[in-house]
Amino acid sequence: MQRIQSEIPQREEEIRRADKVVGELKELRSTWERLVGDREQQIANGEQLARMTKFRAESADRVAALRLESKRTIWERDGLEISRARLDAQLDLLQNDGTVAGHYLRLAWHLMKSGIIWGLAIYGAGCLAFFFGGSVCQR
């Protein structure tokens, strides 16, 4: 993560320098320079301009990739911290309770409590109907 954070400013500085060189090379491409200037120097300037433009594009792509990698690394770190906090809470619960069986009983109750409550309610309603109204199926 630290490598990524330190590489981004370096690449941004390279982009600024490439922009400066590209600007200077474009200033040299005047009409007067084309008519009476040194042809070999004009060709060299054109090649340098193409190289610097390509270099700038590659550096910009690398900065974008580094920023994306940085975001992903931060997201992964945050996810791991959340998972660790959840595991720490479960560990504290186990340590405070002292038994693994107690932990699993609480977990089972948490998962099945609504079904157990509904089952008991239906059973109780059936018992009440039997005692106060006879059979539920009577006419």
Image: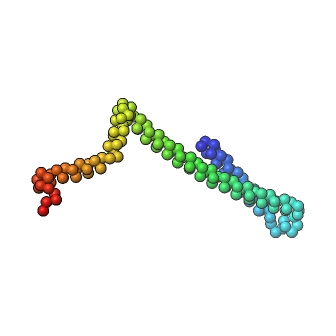
Observer able to see residue 86? yes
Image quadrant for the C terminus? bottom left
Number of marks in the rendered image: 0
- The location of residue 91, given as percent across then percent down, is 41, 35
The residue located at (80%, 57%) in the rendering is: 48
Quarter where residue 21 is shown:
bottom right
Residue 8 appears left or right of 136: right
Residue shown at the point (66%, 52%) measured from the top left:
62
Residues 112 and 73: in front is 112
Image location (x, y in percent) of residue 125: 18, 52
Q: Nearer the viewer, residue 138 or 75?
A: 138
Q: Toward which corner of the image does residue 97 lie, by quadrant?
A: top left
Q: For this view, does 95 lie left or right of residue 124?
A: right
Front residue of 93/124: it is: 124
Q: Residue at x 65, y 46 (%)?
A: 7
> Which image quarter is the N terminus in?
top right
Q: Quadrant of residue 85?
A: top left
State how the image is colored.
rainbow
Direction from residue 13 to residue 32 in the image, left or right: right
Q: Position of residue 43 (x, y in %)?
A: 85, 62
Q: Residue at x 15, y 54 (%)?
A: 129
Residue 16 at x, y = what percent? 69, 53
* Residue 20 seen by the camera: no
Q: Is residue 35 above or below residue 52?
A: below
